[in-house]
Amino acid sequence: REAELTLNRIAPAGSLSYVDQADFVIEAAVENLELKRSLLEQACTHLNGSDVVVATNTSSLPIASLASATDRPALLVGMHFFNPVPVMPLVEMITLDHTAPGAVRTTRALAEAMGKTVVSVRDAPGFVSNR
């Protein structure tokens, strides 16, 4: 029943302009730096709230490079969800020196609400799990 309720709250969007309604954005495109930079830059132009956190789901791309593509680098974090996501409880939260404390708290709270165990790591090649 809970899964059904959750799925009913998810609606595909045909345009990035729909992120204007988001409280939190998770980008999950393929591991292509330029594609992710482009998507993040475009998505951030549509955000209404100045405190909306944007997460990128990556297992290896540099968060600093992705954050620099946006107009809100202090609110961009990495979230590396381990596969298979529904089974694996671990998520790496990747932050930078200038990541806003509120973005860290919000990301951690969201991941924990998803039932995930959060490991905080710094932006480095392979983060923790892929070293």
Image (cartoon, grey):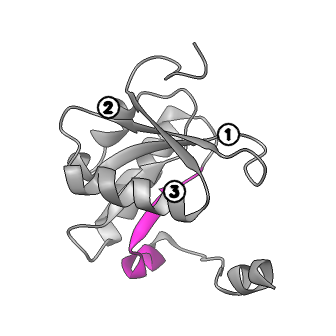
- Left or right for 18, reference 47: right
> Callout 1: helix, strand or loop?
loop
Q: Which residues are magenta?
A: 17-28
Q: Quadrant of the C terminus?
A: top right
Of tags 2 and 1, the one toward the viewer is: 1
- Image vertical order of residue 6 relative to residue 123, above or below: below
- Left or right for 104, reference 86: left
User: What residue would you read off at disc 3?
Assistant: 111
Residue 113: x and y in percent read 53, 65
Of tags 3 and 2, the one toward the viewer is: 3
Q: Are the residues tagged 3 and 2 within 8 Å (C-beta)?
A: no
Q: Are the residues tagged 1 and 3 within 8 Å (C-beta)?
A: no
- Image vertical order of residue 88 relative to residue 31, above or below: below
> Callout 3: helix, strand or loop?
helix
- Image vertical order of residue 27 relative to residue 8, above or below: above
Residue 94: x and y in percent read 41, 36
The numbered dot on residue 64 is 2
